[in-house]
Amino acid sequence: MPRLTDARKELRRAQIAEAAVRCFGRNGLERTSIAEITAESGLSAGSIYAHYRNKADLVQAAARAVLAKRAAVLDEYAASDVPPDPDELLARLIAAIDPAEARVGVQTWGEATTNPAIRGIVVDMVDRMRAMLHDCVTAWLVKVEHHEPAEARERATPIAHRVLALYQAELLYAALRAATGETVS
Amino acid sequence: MPRLTDARKELRRAQIAEAAVRCFGRNGLERTSIAEITAESGLSAGSIYAHYRNKADLVQAAARAVLAKRAAVLDEYAASDVPPDPDELLARLIAAIDPAEARVGVQTWGEATTNPAIRGIVVDMVDRMRAMLHDCVTAWLVKVEHHEPAEARERATPIAHRVLALYQAELLYAALRAATGETVS
DNA sequence: AGTACAACAGAACCGTCGTTCTTTTTGCGC
DNA sequence: GCGCAAAAAGAACGACGGTTCTGTTGTACT
C-alpha cells in the first residue's frame, strides 16, 4: 500500500499510542516491552516502527496524550460562563480523574526527573494547566465575586496555584490507590 | 573474613544504598545499571550481591532511605514545643527539600504505581507523614489557638491533608526544576 | 484494474544488564 | 598470630528487549 491517507495514518498512530498507554498503566513506562505493545495493539513490531521512530518517541506520544486529555477536562470549565468556585472546581477535577491515566501521569512525573524530552512535555502541560486554572479562578472572581478584572487576576494566582497542587496530590493518591491489581482498598 | 561485625555490615549496606540513591537521582530507578552503582560506590558487583539479594531489594532500600529521611525532617517539628502555624510549617518543609532526593522521591511515586513492594513503602510513608502532620497541626491548635484537644484533632485532619498535598506538589516542582543537569532555571 | 510502493508481519540480530561463579583477599574469633 | 569462612573483585553467562531486515500484503492513485 502506498502511504496511508493522512487520516488513516493518524488513526494507526492513535491506536498504537492508546495500546501503549494501557500497557504503561499496567507495567510502567520502562517495564513494558515492545512485544507487549504489539500484543495489545494487535499489530507487529515492524508496524510500530513504521509509525514511531523508537520506543522513546512512543513514550513521548503516550505522555502527551495522557497529559493533554487531562488538560482538556480543564478546558471545559475554563470556557464555562457560570464559573464554579475554587472548591467546586477542584471537586470536579478530582471526580474526573481516571485511575488508569492517573497511573501513567504519575509515571511521567518520575520519568521527567531524568528524561529531558518528557520533562519538557510535563513542564509544558503543568504550565498550561496552571494558566487555565488561573483563567477559571479569575472568571469566578469577576463574574461571581464581582472583583475588578485587574485585581482578580492578581488574586487568582495563589488560588490557582493551590488548586493545582491539591489536584496533583489527589492524582498521586488515585495512582497509588489503584495500583496494578485495580484493588479498591 | 568471617561475617563482618554487625556495625560494619550495616555501614557497607548504607554505603551502597547512598551510592545507589545518587545514581538513581541522576539516571532514574530502572535506567541505572548495577555497573554504575559499583562505579559510584567503589565496590564490585559481587560485593553488592553479598549485601542485597537483587536490584529490586536495593531499590527498596534506597526508596526507604529517601522517604524516611523526609519523614525525619517532619519528626522534628512534631516534637517541637512551640508548634508553627500551618503556613509556617509548610514553608519550613519546603525549605528543607533537597533537589536530588526530591527526584528520587518522585521516581518512587512513579515506580509505586506498578511495583507492589515500592507501593507499600510509599503508602506507608505517606500515611506516616500525614499522621505526623496531624500531630503538628493539633499541637498548634491546642497550644497556640487554644482549642479543646478533641475538637483540635478533628479540625486538624483537613488542614494536615492540605499541608501534605501542597508539600508533595512542591516536591514535584523541585524534582522537575532540578532535572538531571542541575540547571537552576 | 493494475501497478507501485509503503505498511505490515515476524524472524533474526545485537547490545545491555542482572545475576552467578571463581578466585583472591581480608577481617574476626580462637 | 593462625586459620577459616565470609566478603570482595571481576570475568563470564544467559536472558531479555529494542531495533533492523526480509519478504509479503494490500491500499491508494492512474
Image (spheres, coloured by chain):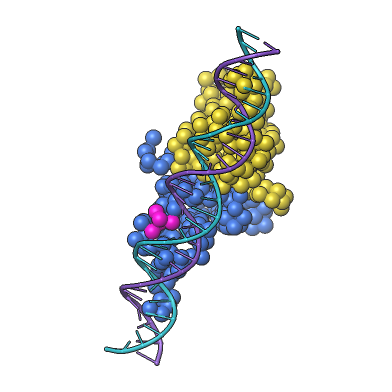
Chain colours: A yellow, B blue, C purple, D cyan
In the picture provided, is B48 more to the left or to the right than A176? left
In the depicted structure, whether residue A8 falls above or below residue D2: above
The residue positioned 49% from the left and 40% from the top of the image is: A112
Q: Name which quarter of the figure residue D24 lies in.
A: top right
As drawn, which residue projects farthest toward the right? A184
Q: Position of residue B89 (x, y in %)?
A: 50, 49
Residue toward you, B123 or A30: A30
In the depicted structure, whether residue B7 falls above or below residue B143: below
Region of the chain picked out in magenta, as a range: B34-38
Q: In the rendered image, is residue A137 in sight?
A: no
The residue positioned 62% from the left and 18% from the top of the image is: A5
In the picture provided, is D7 more to the left or to the right than A148? left
Q: Position of residue D1 (x, y in %)?
A: 27, 89
Quadrant that contains the N terminus of chain A:
top right
Q: Name which quarter of the figure residue B128 lies in.
A: bottom right
Residue toward you, A131 or A66: A66
Q: Main secondary structure of the magenta part?
A: helix
